[in-house]
Image: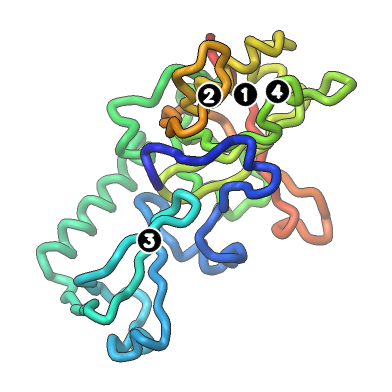
Amino acid sequence: MLLFVNYRLNDEMENSLPLQFEPFPVSRDVLCGFPAVGTVLRVMADQGNEKLGLHLLKRGRWVKFVNMVFELHGGLWHGLLMPSTKLRYLPNDDPLVLQSQRSYEERLSSKWARMPLSSFPWCSHITETNYEDVPFVTLMNVLTDPEVTAKFRCVVRVIGVFPWKAEDFRSPTGTYRIRLTLEDPTARIHAFVYAEDGEEFFGGYSAVDVLTRKMSKLLGITGSDDGTEIAGIPRNPPWVQCCIKSYYLDKSDVWGSRNYRIFATKVVE
């Protein structure tokens, strides 16, 4: 995940930001084995890395990679193993392992520690929710929740929107219908702002210039008087809080048709 987003909003229709590095979504069984806080770094390996013995690795083993290159794909970091890469196994009592475990357990036990570290001491006040006393969870918590339909409160960044023009946020009949791309250090998801949830989100049926200004704040767009994106200027979306609810579209495939909507959230002027 990057602090700045070098991605044109008008590219979202033809070439939307990827939700994961892999060409296809990771299965739910695999996702449920990922940690709920922190970042899962994908590492690419090929036949040229056979000498590292990666096929012998077992889940739960602590290892240290030396001389690994990091690259970007759609704003997502991934590791690339090189001919000079070395792999070192670490014992469970290694000081680095103990410190990592201690930090992870402390974050899990804290009421507010599932907020992204870069959002401390608190997220932006651009948005507010109706569930101020509900602890935050991560997007990985959202993805791996055991219930198909559930409600969550998260701290995220809005890195993409479709449609990207404010005049297209509502249907010809006036219904809000927007898809936001949300990210935190653990995952990315698409979340819809729809109908009455959109009315609450934007504070009613505002004029196009007001909608543009509010969305520009969420997307981290700067440098334009009318709130439109300027080519070549990277965006820095703020960390904002929002409520997310999951739902399904097909009773015969509840997990496969699971989607997400933003609700009980308002963009503050």
Question: 180 or 140, which lies in front?
Answer: 180
Mark 2 and 1 residues: CB-CB less than 8 Å, in contact? yes
**Foreground disc of the pair 3, 2:** 3
Crowd band around label 4 with a 10 angstrom C-alpha radius: few (<14), some (14–19), many (20+):
many
Of residue 198 and residue 170, the one placed in the foreground of this image is 170
What crowding class fits label 2: few (fewer than 14 Cα within 10 Å), some (14-19), or many (20 or more)?
Answer: few
Across and down, in percent, residue 136 comes to 44, 35
Q: Amino acid at mark 2?
A: Tyr
Residue at 41% x, 88% y is 47
Q: Which mark is residue 131?
A: 2
Residue at 50% x, 52% y is 74
Q: Which residue is mark 1?
A: 264
Q: Earlier in the sequence, mark 1 or mark 3?
A: 3
Q: Which residue is mark 3?
A: 41
Q: Nearer the viewer, residue 179 or 16?
A: 16
User: Of the residues tagged 4 and 3, which is closer to the observer?
Assistant: 3
Mark 1 neighbour density, 10 Å: few (under 14) some (14–19) many (20 or more): some
Q: Which residue is mark 4?
A: 198
**For the residues marked 2 and 1, what is the alpha-carbon distance in whole angstroms?**
8 Å
Report the amino acid beneath label 1. Answer: Ala
Residue shown at the point (54%, 26%) measured from the top left = 229
Query: Residue most toward the right?
Result: 173
Q: Residue at x 16, y 76 (%)?
A: 91
Q: CA distance from mark 4 to mark 2?
A: 17 Å
The earlier-in-sequence mark between 3 and 2 is 3
